[in-house]
Amino acid sequence: MKKVIKSSIVTRDLNKMIEPTGNLYKSIAVIGKRARQLAARQKEELTTKLAEFASTVDNLEEVMENREQIEISKFYERQPKPTVVATEEFLEGKLNFRYREDD
């Protein structure tokens, strides 16, 4: 029996990416900014959840494998990457963005 491996590479229509901004590089900048926001939020959530199960014991003999922390980490590893989420939000028109006005 053959295993089907889902590819992590997705072909995007550049014309659809250009439409909202009129420029591919501006579109990528918007997507990148949103991806950084999502990554920061995700990192903050992960750190908070891991801190709940952190051991305050410094003794190596008493430090044991923390199953809760491992499960939480695995859960976050399986989540879609921030760049993928940001790209989907951008292409679906869910992102609001504006340009700074030149002074």
Image (spheres, helix red, strand yellow):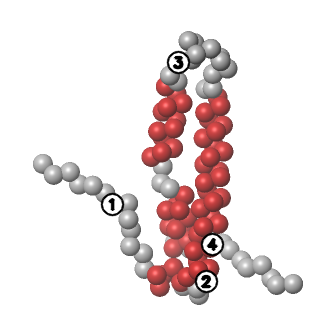
Front-most of residues 58 and 76: 58
Q: Residue furthest bottom?
A: 22
Q: Position of residue 40 (x, y in %)?
A: 65, 52
Please report the residue visible at 65 percent of the width from the left and 31 percent of the height from the top.
51
Number of the label disc, if any, that sits on residue 30: 4
Q: CA distance from mark 1 to mark 2?
A: 28 Å
Q: Are marks 4 and 2 in contact (CB under 8 Å)?
A: yes
Image height of 70 relative to 45, above or below: above
Q: Position of residue 23 (x, y in %)?
A: 58, 85
> Which amino acid type is shown beneath numbered disc 2?
Thr
Question: Reading the chain from its start, which is encountered first: label 3 or label 2?
Answer: 2
Please report the residue visible at 55 percent of the width from the left and 64 percent of the height from the top.
86
Question: Reading the chain from its start, which is encountered first: label 1 or label 3?
Answer: 1
Badge 4 crowding class, 10 Å Cα cut-off, few under 14, some 14 to 19, many 20 or more, is many
Image height of 25 relative to 57, above or below: below
Question: Which mark's residue is nearer the viewer, 3 or 2?
Answer: 3
Q: Position of residue 75 (x, y in %)?
A: 48, 40
Secondary structure under tag 2 reads loop
What residue sits right under mark 3 in the picture? Answer: 64
Secondary structure under tag 1 reads loop
Q: Are marks 3 and 2 in contact (CB under 8 Å)?
A: no
Question: Which mark's residue is nearer the viewer, 1 or 3?
Answer: 3
Question: Reading the chain from its start, which is encountered first: label 3 or label 4?
Answer: 4
Question: Reading the chain from its start, which is encountered first: label 4 or label 2?
Answer: 2
What residue sits right under mark 1 in the picture? Answer: 7
Image height of 96 relative to 43, above or below: below
Q: Position of residue 69 (x, y in %)?
A: 54, 30
Number of the label disc, if any, that sits on residue 21: 2
